[in-house]
Image (tube, rainbow, N blue to C red):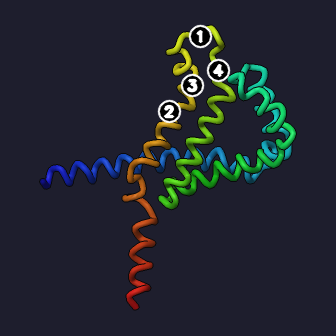
Amino acid sequence: MRGMSAGADWNAKVLAGLRIAIGLLFIIFGQYKVFGTQFTLGGGFQLWINRFLEQGPYPFMVTVLQDFVLPHSTAIAFLVAYGELAIGLGLVLGLLVRTASVCGVIYMLTLLFSSDYPGPQAAFWQYFGAALEHLVLALCFATFVLGNADQVLSLRPYLRRRRSATQQC
C-alpha cells in the first residue's frame, strides 16, 4: 500500500510540473501581448489571421475568420492576450485549473482549425500530423480537466486550509 501512495504522490508532482511548465509558456506568450501593443493594437493579431487565411484553414473556419474575427479583431486580440495570461496564471498558481484548461482546449482547437488544415486530398493520418503543434497542448489541457492537476504545487490546498481555519474561529 505504501508503494502505491508514493507512486501516486510522484504522479501528482509530475502532473503538477507539466501544468506549471505549460502555464509558464502561456504567461510568456500572454504577457508580451498584454503589456505591449503590437499584438492587440499594432496589427499583430490581424497579421496572424490573414496568414491563417493565406495558408488555408479548415473550410468551415474561412467564413468565421473573414466575417467575424477580422471585423472584431481588436476586441478578439485583447481576449486572446488576456486569455493566454489568465490560463497561464491559473495553471502556475493552481487556481481554477479546470476552468483554465477548458479554455485552453477551446483555444487550441480554435488554433488547430484555423491553421492546421492539410488539404482535402490528405490521408486521414495527415490531419493528425498537421495538427500536432496544437493537438499536444489540447491533450495536456484535457488531462488537466479530467485529472487532479491542482492537488500539489498549488495555492488551492493552502487557500482551503486557510478558509477552514477562518471558519473554525
Few, some or many residues within 10 Å of mark 1 (<14, 14–19, 20+): few
**Badge number at residue 122:** 1
What's the CA distance linking mark 4 and mark 1?
A: 9 Å
Q: Secondary structure at mark 3?
A: helix
x, y (%) of residue 132? 53, 26
Q: Which residue is mark 3?
A: 131
The amino acid marked with disc number 4 is Tyr
Residue drawn at the location 62% of the way across and 47% of the way down? 28
Per the image, label 4 sits on a secondary structure element best described as loop
Q: Nearer the viewer, residue 84 or 110?
A: 110
Q: Are the residues at dot 1 and dot 2 in contact (C-beta closer than 8 Å)? A: no
Residue 25 placement (x, y as % from top left): 57, 44
CB under 8 Å between callouts 4 and 1? no
Q: Which mark is residue 136?
A: 2
> Which amino acid, by three-letter code, is at mark 1?
Ala
Judged from this view, the residue extending furthest toward the bottom is 169
Q: Residues within 10 Å of mark 3 (few under 14, many from 20)?
A: some
User: Furthest residue to the left?
Assistant: 1
Task: Give the alpha-carbon distance from disc 2 to disc 3, as whole Å.
Answer: 8 Å
- Quadrant of the snapshot with the N terminus: bottom left
Residue 123: x percent and y percent?
A: 54, 10
From the top left corner, tell me how far across and down residue 113 is, in percent.
65, 29
Q: Earlier in the sequence, mark 4 or mark 1?
A: 4
Q: Is residue 113 left or right of residue 135?
A: right
Q: Amino acid at mark 3?
A: Ala
Residue carrying label 4: 117
Of pointers 3 and 1, the one earlier in the residue sequence: 1
> Quick one: SS at disc 2?
helix
For the residues carrying marks 3 and 1, which lies nearer the camera in this image? 1
